[in-house]
Image (cartoon, rainbow, N blue to C red):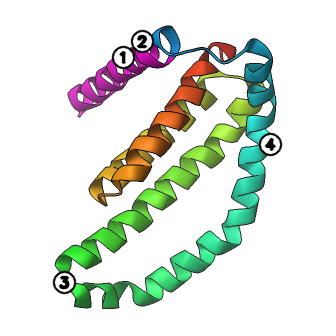
Amino acid sequence: MATQNKDLKSSLNQLEVTLEEYFVKKAPTIPENIKEIIVNFAPWITLVILIITLPAVLFVFGLGTLLAPFSFLGGIQAGFSYTLSMIVLAVSLVLEALAIPGLFKRSKGGWNLVFYASIINAVSNLISFNIVSLIVGTLISWYILFQVKSYYK
């Protein structure tokens, strides 16, 4: 188990280094004043979005619990896909909620949690074959995320 955690951490670190190479060193940079605005307002925007979406998410989870047994009527693939998407949504939201205090403090730990949530969302889009969202959404989020990474210590 410890070896698997070490391998996962090593893989995530290598992914981070590779993405930093492309999104910071090779991509055009965002002006410093815009980066400062993003860093100042990102925690507030994340908090507001989580508060606004919380009732809808709870409704979906409640409705999902009610309808989950019926999702398998569409076949095992439909049921599995639905269940997996609900789990991924929950994990992503929890990571983003946990990141908010770190984002306010400008800590690297907060940035890491947002990065992990973005990876989970990318994998979810890949599994559900949502290719446009995978490519466009992930590229935009990683570009912004890595452009402001230097503000988090």
The Cα–Cα distance between marks 1 and 2, rounded to whole angstroms, is: 5 Å
Question: Can you identify the residue that label 4 sits on?
Answer: 44
Residue occupying image coordinates x 74% and y 27%: 39
> What residue range appears in magenta?
1-23
In the image, residue 18 lies in the stretch drawn in magenta: yes
Q: Earlier in the sequence, mark 3 or mark 1?
A: 1
Question: Can you identify the residue that label 3 sits on?
Answer: 75
Q: Amino acid at mark 3?
A: Gly
Question: With respect to residue 81, does 122 lie above or below?
Answer: above
Q: Nearer the viewer, residue 17 or 97?
A: 17
The Cα–Cα distance between marks 2 and 3, rounded to whole angstroms, is: 43 Å
Q: Earlier in the sequence, mark 4 or mark 2?
A: 2
Q: Quadrant of the C terminus?
A: top right
Q: Earlier in the sequence, mark 2 or mark 3?
A: 2
Q: Does dot 2 land on a helix, a strand or a loop? A: helix
For disc 2, the neighbor class at 10 Å (few under 14, some 14 to 19, many from 20) is few
Q: Does dot 1 land on a helix, a strand or a loop? A: helix
Q: Which mark is residue 18?
A: 1
Pointers 1 and 2 in contact (C-beta within 8 Å)? yes
Question: Can you identify the residue that label 2 sits on?
Answer: 21
